[in-house]
Structure formats: structure tokens, C-alpha cells
Image (tube, coloured by chain):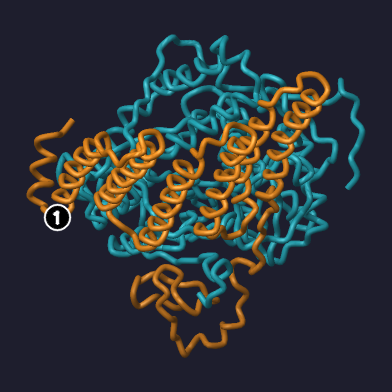
Chain colours: A cyan, B orange
Amino acid sequence: MEKRKIPLRQRTWYKLDNAAKVFPGQDSSSWSNVYRLSATLTEAVEPALLEKAIVITLKRFPTFDVRMRNGFFWHYLEKNPYGVPPVMEDIANPCTRFKMKENRGYLFKVYYYEKRLSVEFYHSLTDGYGASRFFMTLVAVYLRLTGKDIPSGESVFDVNEKPRLGESEDSYSKVCNSKAKAKRLQKFTYRFKGKRLPKHVVNVTTGYMPVSVIKEKAAEHGVTVTEYLAAVLLWVMYNLQKQEKKNKEKHVGIQIPVNARGFFDSETLRNFMLCYSFQIDPKMGEYTFPEIVKQLSLYLRFINNEKELQAMMNGNMGIEKNPLMKIIPSFVKDFGVSMVYKVAGEKATSCLISNVGIIKTPKEMEQYIEKLVLVMGPAMINGARCGSLSYKGTLAFTISNIYVSTKIQKEFFTTLVKFGIPVKIESNKNAIMGGDS
Amino acid sequence: MSYCVNCGVELEKSCSSCPLCDTPVINPNELKNKSEKPVYPENLSIPKSLSKKYWVFVLSLVILIPNLVLIILNSLIFESGVVKYIVGAFVVAWIWFLFPLLWKKPIPVILLAIDALALLSYLDMFKIYGDDTGWFNSIVLPVVISLWAIGNMFIFWLKKPRSKALVSIAVLGSVSVMSFVIEICMNMFYNGRLQIAISLVMTACCVSLMIFFAFLEKSKRFKAWAERKFFM
């Protein structure tokens, strides 16, 4: 693929949104904030058709047809002169780090393996909502190219339609107008420690379970599916710390990203999410699972409102709009973010769970897709970064980390089995360890 | 379909052992499925990263260029004797901090020997170009050799994991030994007699702290008491 020459004035460019500004600074030589969406189809994927599908899809999603450039004060996104990213054979270690000069500068990577089609997104580009819309549209366009009749609707955008202005807006700037700023002082939390896998290698384990059964179990506690799964994960981390029999038990925390579109009028396909953090303090006494579910659920319901979200956004925007921060060169900002993230970033949480929710597609499309999976890239140090989504009545829950031990995965999925939820497991352990599993 | 008898989870057809607990899957009815394609391909993608050698090269250039400029300016304009000491200090810093990065698996004993030799050579430069009153042989040589010997002892001793209290005791012991060496060498050189005073005070302080750490290591009761009495 040749680089096209686009005159400077015709190169559309976007300022990074508030959340996206942080991620380039967090990057290291072996880690980037990445996540992957995979769809297993009923037939083997043809790479040539997939490349055509990307070209068609990118016209409808101009905010994805970009590369990241270095400005003097801030990074920015600029129209990519290549037109299409390379379509690559899949690898055993998903969610490897992004480098801005690789992958023809695109901030998403496209992979195929047998019947599976996967796209990895760099978080500065978009969040789970935007990524799922782009991904499902790409899958629909690909299926159309293979001769299937797939209409638009639900998560599938009409590629003949012109991109709407609101899809490329920075919703953080639009929404932030109150003066209240949320203070987020979190204690350092427990984190899983163990022998690490080699650099760039990640352990990915996906569990498939029926949505109806989880809903039933969550309803027994009067909570939502996200709250229930988050509580199970927190319970697992809490028990792992207890098993380690430390003299001083630390707080156990969980981060839960939330889609802000549910609270504010926004159709942006760029980042528009925030993270809630919840912690329990084991020094307060023994916790039972029902207690954790109840506390987590009550906390989320208390905090999950427009005003709190706006206050959190104001806090984040305040840093960005600080005059001193504005005049600091971008490489100094990156260095600062990198230092803060390495020292404190992941220490305020033991794990993260991101639930994209139910992915809806036109009924005609469902018959050609066997399963959908969301894989969060591993954390730099934390033991569990989890992604989940539901499709056709099955919830796919994936745990990623950089440790040889599969203790967290085992505890999490066996806990669900003990609670009466049937789980089907698949993993990349065989590929990364060279074993037989 | 197969289930793990240990975890109770259902497994992919391509699995021959459970990914969660490594329990082998033995299902005579599904032997034919061994030919199933694995869920993930086997090729690992390991991105190329900048090697340590590259960084050593860049940092070496950063050190080399100003030093070269300094040497040229000195030979043409300043003609100062101080420059060789500045350049020498940079060479020692390079050997101490950048040279180890060139090794894939550095051997601590050899690195320590090289570091000690570099330091001795640098200080020897002062003897050669400055006044040689015997300070090098009387003070520098025994002090550096003692430091090198203690360093080696630590390298061998720390091959097994030791508790924080034990390491503290060893460090304090080394500090008191070094205080003796330094004081004896200085007094022998300047006064010509064996006189010990400051090192005794130093050793007394170190020994009392060593006793404290030894108790802390041995007695759980004392540890509990200390935690209560000295909590902050």
C-alpha cells in the first residue's frame, strides 16, 4: 500500500479528547492501553475481502482513519495518508503494545485466524462503544462482500450514509460546564504478584456463560450483571489476599469504566467514558460475598448519576485546562504522565472490569456470527483486566494478565461454577506456553 | 464436550488439559477432536524494541562529545591540568553505570572487580600527576580493597534470600568494619601510630542497632512489643 500525498489543508485533524490525552504518556516499550474485539464467523475469513471491507468502513468512520502526530504542546490525530491498515494473520499474544510508526500509523490493528476476525484498538482512538460500532459495521460490510444480505441497524452503521458531525465531537469539552470537581483520593490496594510471562506475552482466558443464568443469579442479589460480575471478581481478589496471610492487609479495589453516553446527549465515536473505583477495607473485618455484592451495588447506584460524572469530568478537564499544563511541551507531559502512572496509576486498583453490555446486530447477521469476545489488554502490573460483552444470549468474559500463574482465572471461573453458572473456557495458554492445553 | 474434573468448567474441543488447572482431559469419546484447530495460533509476535546496547551507544555519545570538546579546548586554549581529572571521572562513571548494560547476564563478582580497578586507576592518576606522599598505598589501597572484599562477601551471602533484619545487621557490621579500616589507615598515615577512637563510637552505635535487629529477627514477642511501642 502506497502512501497518498494529501495536501496539508485537506488533512482533517482532531484534538485528542480528555481521556485520550493520557494514553500516549502511559505507553512503555512493552505496554499500551489496548483492547480487542473478536468475532468468530461461520466461514473462514478471506484477508483480501477484509481489506476491501476496511476501506469501505473507514469512509463512514473518519475518526478511525487517522494517525497520531506529535504537536509541540499536545498530540493530535491527523488523517492517515495510507488509506487502509495492514491485514495481518492473528498472533498468540493479543494486545501487544502500539507504536505510532508501525501499522502504517493506524491506531487499530486488524487480524484474522481461521473463522475469527479481530480488531485491536488503541484507547486514544475510541472507547468500547465506538469500537463496537466500528467493529460490527466492519463485520457487516465484510459479510456483504462475501455475498450475504446484511441490512444496517442496531450496532451496524449504514456505510452509505455521511458521517454525522456529533460522531467526531469531543463530548468531554461539551459536557463540562459545572464548577464542582470530584476528588478522587484512593488508597493503594492489594495487587496480585507472581512470576511474569516474557515481555509482550499475555495470558488470555475467556469464559462463555449463558446470560439468562447470570441474570437470574444477579437478580437473587437484586443487582445488575455488571455489578454481580464485578463483585465476584472483587471477592476473588479479596480471598487471594487472605490466602497470602499478610501481616497488613491492604484495601482491595476494582475499577469499572462507565459509558457516559447513557447520561449525556452524545453520539460521539471517540472516548466518552469514566472510571468508577470501589474499594473494600479488609481491616474492617471479614466480608462475605453477599456483603460485597450489596456494598458494591449500593455504592455504584449512589455514585452513578449525571452530577457525579460531571464533577469527575470537571476534575479531569481542570488539569487539561490549567494554563501551566497547557504551556508544558508534550514530551514533558508524557514523561510526567508516565512517572505518575508507573508510581501510582495501577496501585489504586486491584483489578478492572469493562462490560460493553449487549451487542445487538440485525437478525439477518446473527446467523453468520458464532461468538463475539472483548479482550482487554493486560495491566502493567495488576493481576486481572477483564472485558465482557453479551451476544446472542451468551456472555463472554475474558481475563488478561501477564502472569504465568492462572490462579485468578481459576478462582474466578470456578467461583461462578460453584454459584451454579455453567462456564465454557478457552485460552491462549497452549500457544504461549507451548503445552498441550 | 469435555469438562475439567477439577474445576468443573467445560473445555474447548482442542484442549488436552484444562487451561485453568492443567488437569489432563481424558475423554475416549472425543479422541477424534485432537485434530481440532487451537483457539489461538502458535506464532507469538514479539515486537522489536530498542536494545540496551543502543542506549549505551547514545549515552556514550552524550558523554563523549562534551569530553572531546573539553579536551580540544583545553589543548588549544586553557591548558589546564584539571581536565584530565574531569575526563577520568567520566570514564569511571561510564565503567560503573553503562558498561554493565553491555552484558547480557552481568556477573556481579567480575563487575565489582572491574569497578574497583577503575576506581583505583582513577585515584592512582592523582598519585601520578599530584604529590605522591604515600597516601595511595597507605589509605586508598587498603580502603578500596576492603570495600571490594565486603562487596564480594555480600554477593555470595545474598545468593540465598535473607530477611530484612539480617541484611540490616550485615550492613551495620560492614559499616563498623569499614570505620575501623579507615580510621586505622588514616592514623597510621598521619600520626604513625595505631589509634582507635571514632570507630569505637561508631561500632558501639552499630552493635546496639545490630542487637536490636537480632532481637527483632528472633523474638516474635519483642517484634510485637516494638510494633506497639514505636508505631507511627
Question: Most extreme residue toward the bottom, as rendered?
Answer: B28
| Dot 1 amino acid type | Lys
Residue B32 screen position, x and y as percent? 57, 87
How many other residues sit within 10 Å of disc 1, few (<14), some (14-19) or many (≥20)?
A: few
**Residue at point 45% right, 35% down?**
A343
Q: In this rendering, would A379 be left or right of B83?
A: left
**Residue pictured at 39% horizontal, 21% vertical:** A308
* Residue depicted at x 36% and y 58%: A412
Which of the 4 quarters of the picture holds residue A372? bottom right
Q: Is residue A272 above or below residue A417?
A: above
Dot 1: chain letter: B
Relative image position of residue B222 (x, y in whole percent): 9, 47
Nearer-the-camera pick, B54 or B92: B92
The residue at which mark 1 appears reads as: B218
Q: Residue A198: percent from the left, percent from the top?
A: 55, 59
Q: Is residue B45 left or right of residue B148?
A: right
**Camera-side residue of A323 and A161:** A323
Whether residue A34 is visible, yes or no, is no
* Horizontal arrangement in the rendering, residue A290 relative to residue A172 (left or right): left
